[in-house]
Image: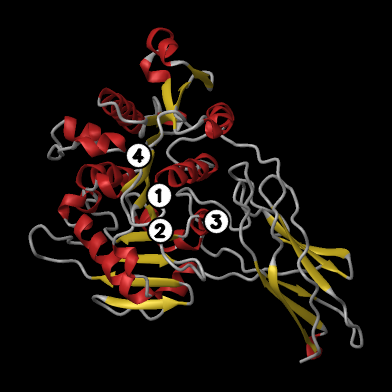
Amino acid sequence: MKSTAGLTLAVSLIATGIVSGAGLATTRDVHTVSYPGSSTAGELQYPSRFHVWVPGNVARIRAVIVRQHGCGTGAEESGENGVFDLHWRALARKHDAALLSPHYIAGEKDCRQWCDPRNGSGQVFLKALNDLAASTGHPELATAPWCLWGHSGGAFWSSLMLASHPERIVAIWLRSGSSVQAWQKGEIPQPTYSAPAWSVPVAINPGLKERGDARFDGIWQTSSLTLAYLRANGAPVLFAPDPLSNHDCRNSRLLAIPYFDVCLKARLPRTGNALRSLRSDRQILVDGSTGEAVSSQTAATGVSSENLSWLPDGSLLRAFGEYIRTGLVTDTTAPSSAPHSLRASRVDSLNEWILEWEAEADFESGIREFVIYRDGTEAGRIPEKPDDRTGFSQFQGISYHDTPKPGFPRMRWIDYNQPAGKSPKYQVSAVNGAGLESPRSKPAGSSPR
């Protein structure tokens, strides 16, 4: 059966309508602000754009999940795609959170001019939140607390935001990066961390293959130094090396998303923005070499400090242990929600039916593919050959930077060579990353057009 998914470049979607200089653009549920670089000392010298997705029908934004790209042109351009990620949107939707993708445009110039927020990127980040609060009609966006996810230079940036805004941060995920080694070596000014910083949960997630690598061993070293520094100050820190990856993000979302989920549940207040303290009776220590929980007494005597990790509660224990051993986290539950808003229309001149629909990602493992049914029998799948480069296939594909690959497919399928006079009924189901299928959508058919 011939089928097509159609391709749409995310960058073309969000760039439409952006004007030079400070400006606003909107594409349905994604809002964008754009700023020029500044020649004023202390302000960001590079242009920047910020894209935010707000879940439909949310009354009040309770948090902002920030997906901060790394250094270099390819990494920066991933900032154009992150806001469209269906799997990360599932986390945002669950917690009435906005999903934010910054894009600092340095190209191959010195990225420390933006990945150190004291050089102006922190200031423009706050400005973007204020401007997006106005354009989205959600004034609370300007003051809501943050989950900070950063890759490489983005992790460098996130580790320094911990010094300046600890009271705003729910949790941090440092994927292959941190600023600690840079300021310990005197390459950048040393930040001043206050007591609230040591209450913020931080996950350190280097690629195990970075260790000893000619190019990226320094990233492994700074991850180790960051672990030692945070632990010495009593911070709740998780150390989760990815056994399958080098500097790429691979399938880190399979632990990062549930980690943020637990931290958001534990720390977001029911009203206001003052973050709650973590409950000490739920926290556990884990031997990072085995993935097994240890008592505090055992940890003090029987586990080396570099192997000791902290978890906000026991619900993450299985996922953590599996991830550090295999680089994956098993999902055993099928998606509970069917695709929805299925539309089917016939093009008589071509003997085709065109199907379009919408769907939310399975929270645990996203969407791998869709199955199309005609009159109760499977008629096709999209994509026909899921991309398994990372060993964890996703409908949108996963880039080096943990964002959807440019050109990610639409939820669209064409049924070719259907003779006139037939009125088939179509349904669609979603298959999650574990290969488990959702319920089917409500049937759809249509009169010819």
- Side of 383 relative to 225 (left or right): right
Q: Point out residue 402 in the picture as x, y percentages from the top left corner.
A: 48, 49
Q: In the rendered image, which quarter contains the C terminus?
A: bottom right
The residue that label 3 is drawn on is 90
Q: Residue at the top extreme?
A: 301
Q: Distance between the residues labelled 2 and 3?
A: 15 Å
Say which residue appears at 37% left-offset and 75% top-offset. Answer: 137
Is residue 168 shown to the viewer in this render?
yes
Q: How far apart are marks 1 and 2 (CA)?
A: 7 Å
- Comes first in the chain, label 1 or label 2: 2
Is residue 48 shown to the viewer in this render?
no
The residue that label 4 is drawn on is 277
- Comes first in the chain, label 4 or label 3: 3
- Quarter of the figure with residue 196: top left
- Quarter of the figure with residue 302: top left
Q: Distance between the residues labelled 4 and 3?
A: 25 Å
Say which residue appears at 69% left-offset and 69% top-offset. Answer: 340
Is 356 situated above or below 182?
A: below
Q: How many labels does the image show?
A: 4
Q: Nearer the viewer, mark 4 or mark 3?
A: 4
Callout 2 crowding tier (Cα within 10 Å): few <14, some 14–19, many ≥20: many
The reply to whether dot 3 and dot 1 touch (C-beta < 8 Å) is no
The residue that label 1 is drawn on is 268
What's under tag 4, amino acid-wise? Ser
Disc on res. 64: none
Disc on res. 62: 2
Q: Point out residue 127 in the picture as x, y percentages from the top left corner.
A: 23, 65
